[in-house]
Image (tube, helix red, strand yellow):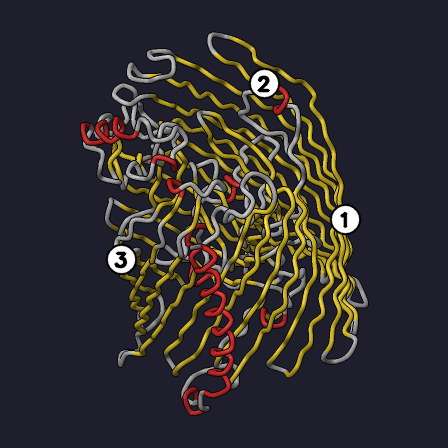
Amino acid sequence: MRDKQNTNHSAVVAGAGFVLSALAVAVPQVAFSQSSALEEVIVTAERRAQDAQDVPIALTIIGGSEISPSGISSISDVALKTPNLTFTQFNIGEPQLFLRGLGTTIDSAGADPTVSVFIDDVYVGRSAGATSDLYDLERIEVLRGPQGTLYGRNVTGGAISIVTKRPSNEFEAKLGVTVGNYGLTVLRGLVDGPIGDNLAGNLSFSKRDRDGYAYSNRSGQELDDADNFSLRGKLLWDISDNTELLLGFDYSTDDNNGQCRNLTKLDNPAGDHNAGGVFVPVLQQIKADTNSEDPRTCAMTIEQYAERDVFGLSARLQMEFTNDLSLTSITAYRELEYSWLQELGGLDSPPNLLSVEDNEGDDADQISQEFRLTKDGDRLFWVAGAYYFKENVDRFANVPIFFGPGSPVAPGALLDRSWLQSATNTSMALFGQVVWSMTDALALTLGGRHTWDEKEMDNAYYSSPGNEVYNFKGLEESWDEFTPRVTVDWQVTDDHMLFATWSKGYKSGVFISQNTTAALAETPLEPEEATNMEIGAKTRWFDNRLQFNLVYFDLENENQQLFRLENFTLVSENFGTESSGIELDFIAALGKNLTLSGMYASLDAEIVGGQFAGNVAPRSPDYKYSVALNYNAALGNGAILDFDASVSYSDNWYMEATNQGVSYMDDYSIVDASVRYTSSGGNWEVTLWGKNLSDELVTSHSIVSSFGGSVELFAPPRTYGVTANYFFD
């Protein structure tokens, strides 16, 4: 079935690139004659300011104007608009990003993300420290594929670079209020401008509150709620004509009730359940008796919670010398603390066969230092640098399991299991990249990075009643790797560029968490090594009224780090993965006030080697797309109306490498729309918006239940509201 789908899909995809390219040539010039040229987008993905269309890498850009309560407000929204990016979230502390089939589910104190997030060029070591509310940003740059040269820690899947607003020498202030269904209220504000002759600063805040989308009919607790406060500020000091210092801080806190977990897919064939489906009829009756068939209703008695605090400081010193030579120093410190208590199975015991409570948390801090020296010449641009990173993480997990009277395993017994980890993760690197413009049209990029990683771990496991199963002190392992990059780009015309890249990415090994055997607990998983090849085109047509970009990639990753739940035990292991696909994006100015944009991605990702060889890689839909339409109309009184509508689609995929039927996720479509009225003076605006207007039930995460079925979390239902902003002179 899968092979047939892939064969048909490959033909469709291969034809798509040809048809769209042909359309770009064939559409008459008159179709764009009344439209305005598209604006240039400046990015810093290659550590210098460039037009995004001149950067020879696979890149997705989300502008600051798209980031709002009515549009992009979280990393999950970013995933909807990015080719081959998938976002799932197990809980507030464990967001999981997969890109081009690569990602990780390992939650160890020594684990690293595969798709990493950077805030103002600062690597965020723990994924939970980068998934708070998104607001008042300059832009988001998503670099697809391994980033083995220029980024602070090597990543095999890709990088999400969040760029916050720099202070301005012109005064700006705004205040925004949002109200919506489910009791949503959002209050946001920003003030920006000069403080003195050589000093400017900005300060922004966001306060978001929302009732729960779901509830537990046994505890009466609302679930899937929101309570977040975020604060961010910057100071920019022009020390001299060629030296500036940018200081920044950010703080975010969440205090929520956690998520609703629902036991589903109990009607799947017996072979698709870990325990063979023997207990499925009992579970089906329990669900009926507890009235928890509604996906937004859970049947738990415990009072859940999910808390998180994030804090960061940064100092960026920029010095410009003669002959276009510059030095950048980025010093940063970050803290993260989170914890949660939840019922993993969606049902307590009794009446369930077993109850699994999960109380976990992290307390982490990190320091990082990066130096970059760059030179921008007529034919040669180069960057050389050094990087240091150190992270301390204390992690706990307490998972008591109560076996109900009807359980075939120790009925009526309590198994109380706890894991404690304390890790110090250190990374150092030397890197460099040179771009040689061999001719006016042809350029060669050569880059490389050598990384040294060391991880030290105390790893302990205790099982009731007070039994120390293992307690390792001073586990230590180190790895190092060189990751090169070669890119050739050809500026065929001023508006058309072709490029080809061969590159490698690397991620260090990891001591695993929550293992029940001593031998595995003291043996780290192998590091990941990704090799990527891609060819692409970035094109403009009709006096830059149409932009059309196309990339083909072929990616091999050794030792992808994943874990899964199997018969009450978390199994951690390495997998090999091969993936390939096509990614395209476009934006067209169809008329003076009408813009159409979108993306399409295909993905053929397969596990190679091991017991699951030949299976579809997890979190890897065959294809996904999004299309957005924007129309703005000038009214007679000088006011402006903006209409936005979009649809995002993802094909089905498997949550687990096992490809069990209970880990199969259905395809889905998300429809969003908004209309904004901006006053004639531009000093206020009101937006009416709706998200997931078709009220699609989308699974945001699932785990395979040991007794049968799948325990699923669901993304938000249909939401709508009004946002008003006032801009002060």
Is 551 or 246 nearer to us in this picture? 551
Residue 152 relative to residue 415: left or right: right
Q: CA distance from mark 1 to mark 2?
A: 33 Å
User: Disc count in the image?
Assistant: 3
Q: Which residue is mark 3?
A: 693
Answer yes or no: is residue 171 visible: no
Note whether 718 is above or below 675 in the view shown: above
Q: Which residue is mark 2?
A: 460
Marked residue nearer the N-terminal end (3 or 1): 1
Q: State the image quarter where residue 308 is shown.
A: top left
Marked residue nearer the N-terminal end (3 or 2): 2
**Type of amino acid under label 2:** Ala
- Please report the residue visible at 69 percent of the width from the left and 23 percent of the height from the top: 475
* SS type, badge 1: strand
- Circle 1/circle 2 CB separation < 8 Å: no
Q: CA distance from mark 3 to mark 2?
A: 48 Å
Residue 259 relative to residue 244: left or right: left
Check the picture and name the quadrant holding the N terminus.
bottom left
- Please report the residue visible at 66 percent of the width from the left and 81 percent of the height from the top: 492
Whole-percent x and y of residue 52? 58, 69
Check the picture and name the quadrant holding the C terminus.
bottom left
**Type of amino acid under label 3:** Leu
- Residue neighbourhood size for the residue with mark 2, other residues' Cα within 10 Å, grouped as few (<14), some (14–19), many (≥20): many
Q: Which residue is mark 1?
A: 482
Whole-percent x and y of residue 191? 46, 54
